[in-house]
Image (spheres, helix red, strand yellow):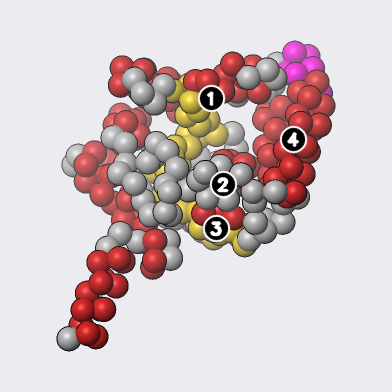
Amino acid sequence: MIRTIIMLLFWALAMPFAAIIGFGFVFLANDIRPLYRLFTWGAYAGVWLTGVRVDTVGMDQFDHARSYIFMTNHVSNLDPPIQIPLIPRRTSVMVKKELFKTPILGPAMRLASLVPVDRGNRDAGIEAVKAAKAVVEKGLNMTIYVEGKRSFDGKLLPFKKGPFYLAMECGVPVIPMTIVGTHEAMPKKRFSIKARRVKVIFHAPIEPQDFGTRECLMEKVRAVIESGLPEEYRQGSSAKADESSRTISD
């Protein structure tokens, strides 16, 4: 509990300061990048203060000067403040629309070209994909939590189809990402944070045009993301365990 309070207190104190400095620079220089870097640094630093440490794998597998659609699993509220600062250059993300009403944070997200999405409205989801396409066409990266929500048990949930429609339409390479360890540090429905070692895996880029349908692309991305998870979090691990138990008992 204390670790979480420290992180939230740091964010509460740092965010207004960053906003004042960053918004001033945006107004004078018409450049969002310093504000973006201030917010992402603050997000990452807040997590670091909780004792969570991060290892990265695969950053050398892609050209940091290009634009990509990063697709990742989602198991904890710690995922975005850990992953977003690691992605080279600016990235947009899809954020639930309610957060855009938050003072300071809401205007900052609009300036950063983040994409609001209403999870319970299919038509709004289609509009979010269109907005995301416009962002990618401007040369920004796009980071998407392809399950649409956090997993309770660390295993992959069904993927949303919109991100793969986006990838096929834009023709931008997809980089699957796997985050491991945040489920133990701060699982869904738990407020307190435990100090843990977290790993963020950047897998090799996948070209959408190499796949005939978005369903095939989805299957490939899912398999790659899951390959980075520990065995106990992969689909079918429970079934394998049950089969082993039956074999032993027989």
Relative to the observer, which residue lies in front, 134 or 13? 13
Q: Residues within 10 Å of mark 2 (few under 14, many from 20)?
A: few
- Give the labeled residue for mark 3: 184
Relative side of 233 to 25, left or right: left
From mark 2 to mark 4, how far is it between C-alphas?
19 Å
Which residue type does callout 3 highlight?
Glu
Relative side of 44 to 213, left or right: right
The label shown at residue 114 is: 1
Percent x, y for residue 50?
Answer: 72, 51
Choose the circle earlier in sequence order: 1 or 3: 1
| SS class, disc 3 | helix
Highlighted range, magenta = 21-29
- Give the labeled residue for mark 4: 11
From mark 1 to mark 3, how far is it between C-alphas?
28 Å
Choose the circle earlier in sequence order: 2 or 4: 4
Q: Is residue 245 above or below residue 96?
A: below
Choose the circle earlier in sequence order: 4 or 1: 4
Task: From the image, state whether disc 2 or disc 1 is nearer to you.
Answer: 2
- Give the labeled residue for mark 2: 190
Percent x, y for residue 73?
Answer: 43, 47
Magenta highlight: main SS: helix
Task: From the image, state whether disc 4 or disc 1 is nearer to you.
Answer: 4
26 is within the stretch colored magenta: yes
Which residue type does callout 4 highlight?
Trp
Which residue type does callout 2 highlight?
Arg
| SS class, disc 1 | loop
Task: From the image, state whether disc 2 or disc 4 is nearer to you.
Answer: 2
From mark 4 to mark 1, how far is it between C-alphas?
19 Å
